Amino acid sequence: YLYSTFQYCFKSSKSYPSTLSLNKLKKKHLFKNKKKKISIQPITVMHGKINSICYLINNKLAYAGDVSKFYEKDLKLLKKLKYFVIDCLWYKKHPAHFNLDNVLKIIKTIKPQKTILINMHNDIDYNEIKEKLPRSVEPGYDGMTLAL
């Protein structure tokens, strides 16, 4: 889709030099330095009627920023994570994003140690939702860091 729609960005012409290269995601990316290894595995998820990507990092953290459904076959990859960082747009249903009920339901299935809600719409008040959530779930905030 990207190549066919924005071909000029990937393939130079006489009037326009290319500015991007098209790279497909591997099944797993491994980054190493002298002290640490970081493994990143993309997992395809639904985002409304299109696919999006959830990233599984070192099999300890899953980051799903735009998701409305996980495929059943991939749920085993998400079991017992240390951190589950998940899209939680608002309280009511949305066709392309999880809402709070969706998040709480999937948490019961995969049982992460800690869940961080992200991508929250302005109708979710930070302090108000924080009071309502189970201890293992908290709203994310700008500048938040997690230690693996």
Image (cartoon, grey):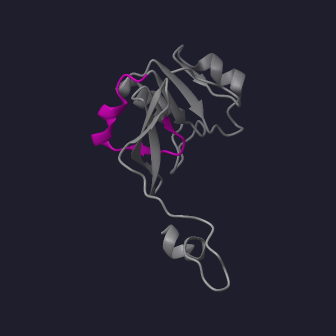
Q: In this view, does 15 lie above or below 125?
A: below
Q: In this view, does 35 lie above or below 5?
A: above
Nearer the observer, 117 or 83: 83
Residue at screen point 63% across, 28% down: 140
* Residue 26: % across, % down: 38, 50
Residue at screen point 33% across, 33% down: 77
Nearer the observer, 43 or 40: 40
Q: Quadrant of residue 128?
A: top right
Q: In this view, does 116 lie above or below 66?
A: above
Residue at screen point 62% across, 26% down: 139
* Residue 61: % across, % down: 46, 28
Nearer the observer, 126 or 43: 43
Residue at screen point 36% across, 26% down: 110
Q: In which quarter of the image is residue 57?
A: top left
- Side of 107 where 131 appears, left or right: right
Q: Give the range drawn in magenta.
A: 63-81
